[in-house]
């Protein structure tokens, strides 16, 4: 959560730290002085040691009054000087800086570069002035863009554009966090900032790759949007259920949706997909939770919308009109062969974690996402809500099996209910056992 915090990785990190330590040092010194004198006076002038007739009525003492007025004033001016000088440096935007647009929305960050490249992590060259133009979609909530290692933080407000800048001095990876509580997914609003050497950054910037670490470029604009808009977190491409319905075979299919509380059947055509992107809570697919998907209408233009729809169309195995029809038998008679006895392969927990979309909501490194991390979960004691009552349970095999079959039976404290579908209906018992064994190994 504070990766690289002690590296002082920006040009003004030292100045900000200096202002902090001067302010803290003066505050601690004054606290010790005042409290120390109070304790001294309590014992030195205790009523048992002083007679009433010896107490003098002192109306004023000019030297002392001057001292306790002038000295604190000087100390306040010292704090102000160091605080203001570092603040002025932070707020003075340099000319000709490399500008990146940052969109903060519930609960992710998106970065758009001058050449149109869009990413979910921020990549910048070392030693260059970087200016961030920050905004949030209308109808979203207040966020705050925070890079602890750079000592920079700025509010991201719907309907308002804010700015910050930095110049990174140390190559490496750093955390980006949201420093303003913004709802149930606040703790998941994390991403990375990678500071790169200038040649490596230029090579990536001029390529079509979404990330400097990608081995190949996306096949089209639609795939790029699928990844950078965060669709990949909730919608699979292999038919497995996640937080949202899979895109595989969706286009042209008849699906049941809830519209204003009423169940109806619609065709997943172009108009339906456009409506779902612009107003995701209008027609919620049966079996999935509303209020999860953000409104993306402010984040993509008309051409990008069509590219994303085209990408969803490409996820069908057949043409839309025949997407759910059984394939007709081939005209030629198939060649008959003797059946071969093939031993069924055992399911692999690590593979299931990825293919069954557990990866969309559960991390393996201890970081919070939509659901709790799998790292160290086995054998730990968890606070859960069971029928609205808080209790503690041990995350043993029985608990893991129960959570897969009925995820709303025991909801871990701090996480929203009704997000995870009951995977007991989608997995075989052998697959569930393999997944549980995999989780047990993640200590």
Image: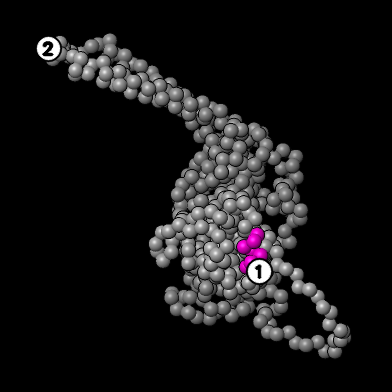
Q: Which of 303 and 178 is in front in this view?
A: 178
Q: Residue 53 carries which label?
A: 2
Residue at the image position 67 percent from the left and 37 percent from the top: 171
Q: Mark 1 points at which residue?
A: 431
| Residue 274 position (above or below residue 339) | above
Residue at the image position 71 percent from the left and 62 percent from the top: 220
SS at mark 2 in the image = helix
Specify the farthest residue to the left: 53
| Residue 289 position (above or below residue 384) | below
- Of marks 1 and 2, which one's residue comes earlier in the chain? 2
Bounds of the magenta segment: 432-438
Main SS of the magenta segment?
helix
Number of numbered discs visible in the structure rendering: 2
Q: How is the image coloured?
A: one colour
Q: Position of residue 114 (x, y in %)?
A: 64, 47
SS at mark 1 in the image = helix
Note whether residue 308 is visible. no
| Residue 330 position (above or below residue 284) | below
Q: Which of 28 and 256 is in front in this view?
A: 28
| Residue 324 position (above or below residue 290) | below
- Separation of marks 1 and 2 at Cα, in angstroms: 89 Å
Q: Position of residue 17 (x, y in %)?
A: 52, 29
Residue at the image position 58 percent from the left and 70 percent from the top: 423
Q: Residues within 10 Å of mark 2 (few under 14, many from 20)?
A: few
Q: Residues within 10 Å of mark 1 (few under 14, many from 20)?
A: some
Q: Where is residue 182 in the image (x, y as percent from the top left)?
A: 46, 52
Left or right: residue 421 compared with residue 39: right
Note whether residue 39 is visible. yes
On whether residue 261 falls in the magenta region, the answer is no
Q: Which of 350 and 185 is in front in this view?
A: 350
């Amino acid at each position: 959560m504070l990766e690289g915090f002690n590296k002082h990785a920006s040009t003004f990190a030292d100045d900000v730290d200096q202002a902090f330590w001067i302010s803290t040092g003066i505050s601690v010194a004054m606290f010790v002085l005042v409290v120390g004198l109070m304790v001294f006076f309590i014992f030195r002038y205790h009523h048992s040691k002083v007679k009433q007739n010896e107490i003098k009525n002192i109306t004023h003492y000019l030297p002392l009054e001057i001292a306790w007025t002038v000295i604190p004033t000087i100390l306040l001016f010292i704090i102000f000087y160091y605080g203001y000088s570092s603040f002025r440096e932070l707020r003075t935007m340099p000319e000709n800086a490399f500008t990146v647009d940052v969109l903060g929305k519930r609960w992710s960050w998106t970065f758009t570069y001058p050449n149109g490249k869009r990413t979910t992590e921020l990549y910048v060259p070392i030693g260059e002035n970087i200016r961030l133009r920050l905004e949030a979609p209308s109808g979203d909530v207040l966020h705050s863009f925070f890079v602890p290692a750079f000592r920079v933080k700025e509010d991201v407000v719907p309907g308002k554009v804010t700015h910050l800048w930095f110049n990174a001095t140390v190559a490496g990876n750093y955390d980006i966090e949201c420093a303003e509580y913004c709802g149930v997914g606040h703790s998941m609003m994390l991403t990375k900032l990678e500071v790169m050497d200038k040649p490596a950054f230029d090579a990536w910037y001029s390529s079509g790759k979404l990330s400097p670490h990608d081995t190949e470029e996306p096949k089209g604009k639609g795939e790029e949007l699928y990844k950078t808009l965060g669709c990949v977190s909730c919608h699979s491409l292999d038919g497995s259920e996640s937080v949202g319905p899979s895109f595989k075979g969706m286009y042209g299919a008849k699906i049941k949706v809830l519209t204003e509380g009423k169940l109806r059947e619609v065709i997943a055509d172009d108009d339906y997909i456009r409506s779902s992107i612009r107003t995701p809570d209008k027609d919620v697919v049966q079996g999935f939770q509303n209020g999860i998907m953000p409104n993306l209408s402010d984040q993509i233009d008309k051409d990008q919308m069509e590219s994303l729809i085209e990408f969803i169309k490409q996820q069908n195995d057949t043409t839309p009109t025949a997407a759910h029809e059984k394939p007709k038998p081939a005209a030629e008679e198939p060649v008959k062969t003797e059946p071969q006895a093939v031993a069924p392969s055992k399911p692999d927990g690590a593979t299931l974690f990825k293919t069954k979309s557990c990866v969309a909501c559960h991390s393996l490194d201890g970081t919070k996402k939509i659901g709790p991390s799998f790292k160290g979960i086995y054998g730990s004691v968890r606070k859960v809500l069971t029928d609205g009552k808080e209790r503690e349970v041990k995350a043993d095999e029985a608990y893991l099996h129960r959570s897969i079959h009925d995820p709303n039976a025991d909801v871990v404290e701090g996480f929203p209910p009704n997000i995870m579908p009951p995977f007991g209906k989608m997995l075989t018992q052998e697959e569930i056992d393999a997944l549980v064994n995999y989780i047990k190994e993640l200590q």
